[in-house]
Amino acid sequence: MNVMVIGRGGREHSLVQKFSESEQVEQVFVVPGNPGMQDVAECVAIDEDDHDKLIAFAIHNEVGLTIVGPEVPLLEGVVDRFIANDLKVFGPTQAAALIEGSKHFAKRIMEKHNIPTAEYQAFSDVTAAKHYIEQKGAPIVIKADGLAAGKGVVVAETLSEALQAVEDMLENGQFGEASREIVVEEFLTGEEFSLMAFVNGANVYPMISAKDHKRAFDGDQGPNTGGMGAFAPVPDLGEASYTSAVESVIQPVAHALVEEGRSFTGILYAGLIETKEGPKVIEFNARFGDPEIQVVLPLLENDLVQVIADVMNGVDPQLVWSEETCAGVVVASNGYPGGYEKGRPLPDIKGEQGTFIVHAGTALVEGVYVSSGGRVLLAGSKGMDLAHALDRTYDSLRVFDGNDDFFYRRDIGRSSVSSSSGTNVK
């Protein structure tokens, strides 16, 4: 069949790489894609929000399966439009995608269905929000209710930082419509990890665990970003914690969305933290996490097309995972997640055999790759353990050393290396 991926970043590059390996696929289209994907897919110059053109293209090119990568088209109802045109699409409807589109909605669902998460209150009034924060004290977490490209969260270490975040979001409109309402929640301590699952209604098929690094700089310093690197599986996550996350979070929220009349089909992502009371939810996404997908999919031994077909047909896909570990490090434009320059030429990055490159924010100018976004690319590698995978990945990034146009974290996964000889949690 012909397969179409909607999106243009690293998540979509990982998807087209995986789809291109399938014997069931004749042609992979990526809309609009980026030049780094051209060796595995045909890039089509249609914007993700142009639903009419997307549908017309899918019909004209006999696309047998479409998967939606980014969150914005999902929340704009692109899946609903595809379904209305009898096109096979893998992703949640607009109603189901609200689990990511509104943090307040997600909190209400968790509260109603006893899914473990941090204590919270939602506010649209500056004075009320500040009063609540002054009562609770710091550290405390302030989140824009809507989508903010991974940047709408402030982990405030001090009271003044928290109050400033409230002003920035509610009073100054830092994130526009996304921060007209905010969620203020307790600060949780513990190890964070990510868990994604293929979902169709009440049927849940969890993937291996992964760990993302959100802060911009080494030592988990600096502002939150869309993710500076990741690895999978998490070697120091015990089997009990993994099972608890599936049974107390993933399965219950899938059931809850069915009960709420918002049945979810697609990829459900849970950002979790392992606390003394067990795993608790930090956030939900309605699609593959990025960069987590970039280290999880290389370890999936199944044909992804067959997995999606099975899930959509209510059949257990019998997921099979490599015993290896996969690690990836993001190269970002200097200044990210703040202001940065585009059009900066990239060095020739190859690395040793087994290293792979995922393009996120790149363009091709006169045969040379240049930056076109904040997160430019991810270098990744599989290895027999986390230390091996990281060593190979960082070797490939040496070409960026001394280049002032780009930066990358040099401590991705290092705190977990000592545990990497443990059992991989599937």
Image (tube, grey):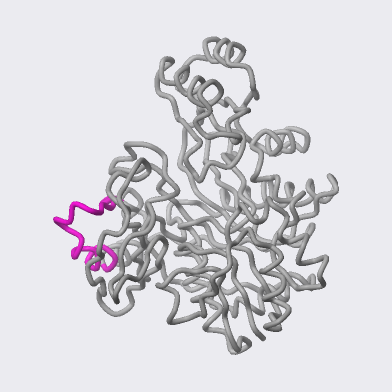
Q: Residue at x 57, y 80 (%)?
A: 28
Q: Which residue is at the front of the view, 325 or 243?
A: 325
Residue 399 in picture, x, y percent from top left: 19, 65
- Quarter of the image with the C terminus is bottom right
Task: Give the residues drawn in magenta, as a range.
Answer: 392-411
Q: Which residue is drawn at 63% across and 25% down?
A: 120
Q: Residue at x 64, y 22 (%)?
A: 124
Q: In the rendered image, is residue 384 in sight?
A: no
Question: Residue placed farthest to the left in the image?
Answer: 402
Q: Which residue is at the front of the view, 57 or 293?
A: 57
Residue 155 in picture, x, y percent from top left: 45, 30
Q: In the rendered image, is residue 253 in sight?
A: yes
- Indicate yes or no whether the magenta region holds residue 408: yes
Is residue 273 shown above or below 383? above
- Indicate yes or no whether the magenta region holds residue 116: no
Q: Which residue is at the front of the view, 125 or 309?
A: 125
Is residue 273 shown above or below 170? below
Give residue 401's quadrant in the image. Answer: bottom left
Say left or right for 382 vs 219.
Answer: right
Residue 40 in picture, x, y percent from top left: 47, 81
Is residue 346 shown above or below 19? above
Q: Residue at x 53, y 82 (%)?
A: 20
Say left or right for 89 vs 359.
Answer: right
- Quarter of the image with the N terminus is bottom right
